[in-house]
Image: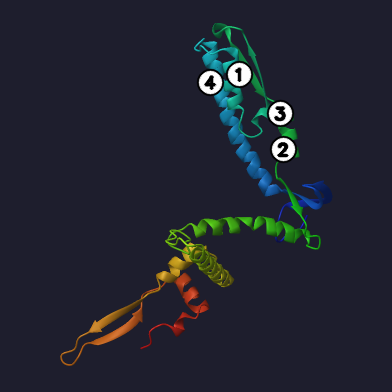
Amino acid sequence: MVDEERFPGVSVIETRADAFGRNWRVILTHSDNFHIKQTRGFAQTLSKATRQLSELAARLSRGKTRKTPNAVEAEIASILKPRWVERVVTWTLTGDDPKNFALSFRVDARARRKLEDEIFGKRVLFTDREDWPVANVIAAYRSQFKIEADFRQMKNRSVVACSPMFHWTDQKIRVRAFYCVLALAVARLMAREAARVNCPMNVRRLVSSLHDIQETVLIYKGDRGRPRARHMLTEIDSTQEKLYTVFGLDAYAPKR
């Protein structure tokens, strides 16, 4: 096991290997949770493939096809194309005429167990971080989804968006890209601060929550004299209260 607290159910094997023209530190991980998810997903894929094969076999047994043997085999290959299905399903097509085609197939339980032992739950990580603990390498790999989420965020037109550009010269495009990335960095730092007060959320939700903390003005008109204006905040929920505190918004809030 790596770190049961950070990565429960994860075991590793560390070695070295030559790949991509150099020698790498290689870490093979196995996650029980990932193994279960892959098993469940593959079972659904396999069920769909066997159902399609059964429908094809029934259609062939009724002589309801004009396809040549090569065309039928191509259809079978298409059904078995999804990942790994071909490894666990064996089939036989008999007959040399559409009227007497017969398809038989079965799921090879032994091949399926071998597939699970070989692949399911495993990831191979190549790294040049020789001094990092294994747990840190795994954490860095698993954090890649955050980078991918940030690229998607940069395409969002309402929050730190790089588009539409509205610029044509290289200099202005570089400036635009710079302050968009800077805005994203600030937003990510704000999300980190929010997570520290038990308010984990993505950038879009964070900005939306802060946007809803608004100031309103109430106008009171007396019997005489000029109307009085009272500035106050709109009602906020418990999450917004935490954000209000952690970002020190009281300094900008209206005072009585």
Rendered view: 59 above or below 161: above
Colouring style: rainbow
Q: Which of marks 1 and 2 is in front?
A: 1
Q: Nearer the viewer, residue 142 or 185?
A: 185
Residue sitting farthest toward the bottom: 225
- State the residue position of label 1: 73
Q: Where is residue 39 in the image (x, y as percent from the top left)?
A: 65, 39
Q: How far apart are marks 3 and 1 (CA)?
A: 23 Å
Q: At 73% from the left edge and 61% from the top edge, which residue is drawn?
A: 136
Q: Name the residue under label 2.
A: 116
Total number of numbered discs in the rendering: 4
Residue position marked by numbered label 4 in the rendering: 55
Q: Which of disc 4 and disc 2 is earlier in sequence?
A: 4
Q: How far apart are marks 3 and 2 (CA)?
A: 11 Å
> Relative to 83, is 205 above or below?
below
Q: Are marks 3 and 4 in contact (CB under 8 Å)?
A: no
